[in-house]
Amino acid sequence: MPEPGPCDCPGCPNVFSLKAAEEDLRRYRRKGPDPSTQSLISAIESQGIDGASVLDIGGGIGAIQLELLAAGAATAESVDATPSYVAVARAEAERRGYGARTRHLEGDFVALANEVEPADVVTLDRMVCCYSDMPRLVGRSLEHARRMIGLVYPRDTWWTRAMARAMAAFHSLTRDPVRWYIHSESALDALIRGAGFERRVLRRHVLWQVALYVRIGT
């Protein structure tokens, strides 16, 4: 399955339609999670998740939540800024029998962070790319991660930076609010390690890379 192009991040605020969310759900039902998302799910499962709570920031249609619940997680909460994705994720969770074990919040996670309970596992799948203030987003996410934090984010390379500049120019002309941010990999890594985590998994795809960090001592 080809890698999705930038920026299809469901965390980007309120710009994705119900049609787009429904198409993503149909694709997920047919083919399963996207390759980078599946890499993150597999990395988390390898650490053991029986009875764990999950917080999925920028959760989209809920693929991570559904897969981890099926693998043994106890509960899953999602925070997403796009109403259409929140509606689709909630309906799919209920359809699969997870309605009582899931919670879906609509809005910017940073703004809602004080309303969200910590979780054993926190995920940001193609969410960092949608946020200009990476330290603030990741910092608040780390505050909620009791055991693990997993991320899928763009590789910090010359070609991804060139793509981001081209997209920014195009979207400026079309007045599209979506932006694709390439944040420093070393700065992101230092921020997470500084909060008491160690990196257990790093997998690179064409555009994206997958990193899983586990809190030291857990």
Image: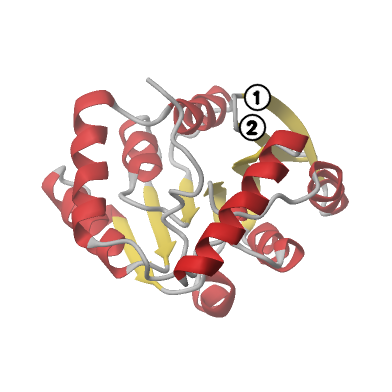
Q: Quadrant of the C terminus?
A: top right
Task: State the SS at label 1.
Answer: strand
Residue 61 in sight here: yes
What residue is shown with label 1? 204
Q: Residue 5's spot in the image, x, y percent?
A: 47, 38
Q: Residue 206's spot in the image, x, y percent?
A: 59, 25
Q: Residue at x 46, y 57 (%)?
A: 58
Of 1 and 116, which appears nearest the observer?
Answer: 1
Q: Residue 122's spot in the image, x, y percent?
A: 56, 50
User: In screen coordinates, is 112 left or right of 131?
Assistant: left
In this view, 99 is above or below 157: below
Question: Badge 1, how many Cα within 10 Å: few under 14, some, many 20+?
Answer: some
Q: Tags 2 and 1 in contact by the CB under 8 Å rule?
A: yes
| First reached walking from the N terminus: tag 2 or tag 1 | 1
Of 211 and 171, which appears nearest the observer?
Answer: 171
Which amino acid type is marked by label 1?
Answer: Arg
How many numbered marks are there? 2
Q: Residue at x 30, y 69 (%)?
A: 83
Could you tell me how far apart the alpha carbons at marks 2 and 1 are, in whole angstroms? 4 Å
Q: Quadrant of the N terminus?
A: top left
In this view, 139 is above or below 166: below
User: In screen coordinates, is 61 left or right of 201?
Assistant: left
User: In screen coordinates, is 63 left or right of 218?
Assistant: left
Task: State the SS at label 2.
Answer: strand
Q: Answer with the quarter of the image where residue 114 lies.
A: bottom right
User: In screen coordinates, is 186 left or right of 73?
Assistant: right
In this view, 37 is above or below 145: above
Q: Residue at x 66, y 55 (%)?
A: 181
Of 154 and 215, which appears nearest the observer?
Answer: 154
Point out which mark residue 209 bears.
2
Which amino acid type is marked by label 2?
Answer: Gln
